[in-house]
Image (cartoon, grey):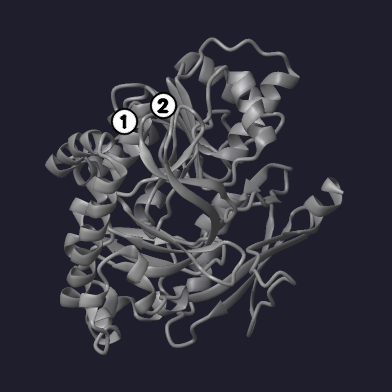
Amino acid sequence: MDPLQVIYDRAPIPLQHAMTTLSGYQRNRSRYGRTYWQHREWLADFDGWSLAEKLEHQAAELRDFIRYATEHSPYYRRLYSTTDLDEVRTPENLGLLPIIEKEELRTNASDIYTVSRRWAVEGHTGGTTGKSLVVLMTRDDMMKRMAMLDHFKARVGFEHRKMRRATFSGKHIVPPGQNRSVFWRYNHACRQMLYSTFDLTESNLCHYIRSLNDFKPNAIDGFFTSMVDVANYIERHDIKLQFSPVAIFPTSETVTPSGRETLERVFRSKVYDQYASSEGAPFVTQCRYGSMHVELASGVFEQLNGTDNEILVTSFTTHGTPLIRYRIGDSMVIGEPTECRCGIQSPLVRSIEGRRDDYLFRSDGAKINAGNVANLFKNMPNSLVKAQLIQESMGDVTILLVVDEARYRPDDDALLLKEARHKFGATTRITIRHVDDIPRERSGKHRLIKNSLAARSDG
């Protein structure tokens, strides 16, 4: 575990607030420089381009990106050595190139990288398979991704870092064993109150609501199921809110119609969904009129033939770890390009089907949702092939691991166990088992979470 996390866990709460803010300012340095502001301005102009102009720009970016990957990545240079890249002129020609599987990305990462770790922004992902991946991003790409995200939010009235936001994420902000009912920490660098998603029990939720009413956020973002749990509590107890946010921005999980209705009814604010990924996938964002727009400036989505709406992604903001025809494991239904009432011309996504809303229980009954479970593996090295978490009784969780024996170290289990303790608490019994394989479901998909307790309660 990160030594700074150990220091943080032992620090008094006021110092934890200060450390959270310091971490925020450090992140700002790699996210909000000149490239960020230039790209924000360019994106505002790009919104007004015609569909033909946008598609022409996308094709030019695609050609440049493939050329960059071939020149700077030993892996892509070998992969495309027998392909005439001059024939790959538009997204329609991408079928001439091979598909990149997650396992190929993991095992060949060092040859795929085009930048050194020293100059890169490092990202980690667990995802729906539990596969551990480390991706390297250039600082320019990170700034462009943050510009796209903040531009999306600005379209509906929220300006990041100028307005207050409440975030329900997988950050370890409340140490295991804390005996005070303070389940939030403040990041002054972004005017952001971070709320723990690991302590949302019936007895704790009243403290969350009190903090929200004191803070009065202009936007709420983070894990969808956690925000719905908060909204349900407010409604059940007929609590009067002292604020109404400009917008609600869910991440990491599928937005269900019933959950959306609950959030919008309770907070008197609209929900705006989005799609991206820790690896750096292109963006899909929702506008004021509810349409899900493919952000053509960020990359290419392809529908994979012969599958259940599965997609391939090519992302223009992954120069450090190029993603070209990457099989990300998600599914979506993409419609024809059109002009929406919001004025933006782009293809529209009819549905996003790749993110599940499964969860596990902590021993005290708190739900640990799919986003937090996937984050268990974010700090693991590129040594985990597949994982699955199984719960058959309250207070017990079994983690099955398929590992790369050549890369997996003996102390990796200890690292994973420490991460699990932060998420499930000290009283939940965690068992790690190494297996040769984890069978897929009848549908052919791999499930990260199998919760018999949830299945019984839902049935």
Q: Indicate which disc, 2 or 1, sits on the residue closer to the N terminus.
A: 2
Residue that numbered label 1 is attached to: 190
Count of all numbered marks drawn on residues in the image:
2
Residue 1 in view of the camera:
no
Tag 2 secondary structure: strand
* Above or below, 23 relative to 60: above
Residue 329 is situated, as x and y percent measured from the top left of the image, at 52, 65
The residue positioned 15% from the left and 44% from the top of the image is 35
Residue 103 is situated, as x and y percent measured from the top left of the image, at 46, 77
The residue positioned 62% from the left and 39% from the top of the image is 225
Tag 1 secondary structure: helix
Direction left: furthest residue: 34
Q: Residues within 10 Å of mark 1 (few under 14, many from 20)?
A: some
* Above or below, 406 relative to 232: below
* Above or below, 68 relative to 111: above
Residue that numbered label 2 is attached to: 165
| Quadrant of residue 121 within the rendered picture | bottom left
The residue positioned 60% from the left and 37% from the top of the image is 226
Residue 181 in view of the camera:
yes
Spatial CA distance of label 2 from label 1 is 8 Å
